[in-house]
Amino acid sequence: MCPDCEDFTRTVFLLGQLALYADTSGADERFVEAVAQSLAVSLLEPPPGIFPPGYDPEDGPDHPGESS
């Protein structure tokens, strides 16, 4: 696995673990918010090969409240 792919995978894993922690009783919400923002900002550009060729994140169905 390429180094960028490994970092991306690790960050996604950490976000998942943070989501699980956030759902526990007594979770520190300020910690979750701070760490989630820090992790999410590092996912701005996924490494090549994560998405199939020609993938367009803007293409797809409209979300509720959005129009074409």
Image (cartoon, helix red, strand yellow):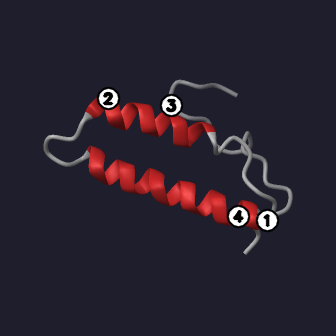
Nearer to us in this view, 19 or 38:
38
Quadrant for residue 50, please give it: bottom right
Quadrant for residue 67, please give it: top right
The type of residue carrying mark 1 is Gly
On the question of residue 50 being in view, the answer is no
Nearer to us in this view, 14 or 46:
14
Q: How dense is the environment of label 3, judged by Cα within 10 Å: few (below 14), some, or many (20 and up)? A: few
Q: Which mark is residue 64?
A: 3
Horizontal side, residue 17 vs residue 39: left or right: left
The CA span between labels 1 and 2 is 34 Å
Where does label 1 land, which residue? 49
In the picture, the quarter occupied by the C terminus is top right
Location of residue 27 in the rendering, given as x and y in whole percent from the top left corner? 21, 41
**Residue drawn 79% across and 54% down?**
55
Where does label 4 land, which residue? 5
Location of residue 62 in the rendering, given as x and y in whole percent from the top left corner? 61, 36
The CA span between labels 2 and 4 is 29 Å
Is 26 rendered above or below residue 50? above
Where does label 2 land, which residue? 30
The CA span between labels 4 and 3 is 32 Å
The answer to the question of whether label 4 and label 1 lie on touching residues, with beta carbons closer than 8 A, is yes
The type of residue carrying mark 4 is Cys
On the question of residue 9 being in view, the answer is yes
The type of residue carrying mark 2 is Arg
Residue at the farthest left position: 25
Q: How dense is the environment of label 4, judged by Cα within 10 Å: few (below 14), some, or many (20 and up)? A: some
Question: Of label 4 and label 1, which has the lower sequence position?
Answer: 4
The CA span between labels 4 and 1 is 8 Å
Question: Of label 4 and label 3, which has the lower sequence position?
Answer: 4
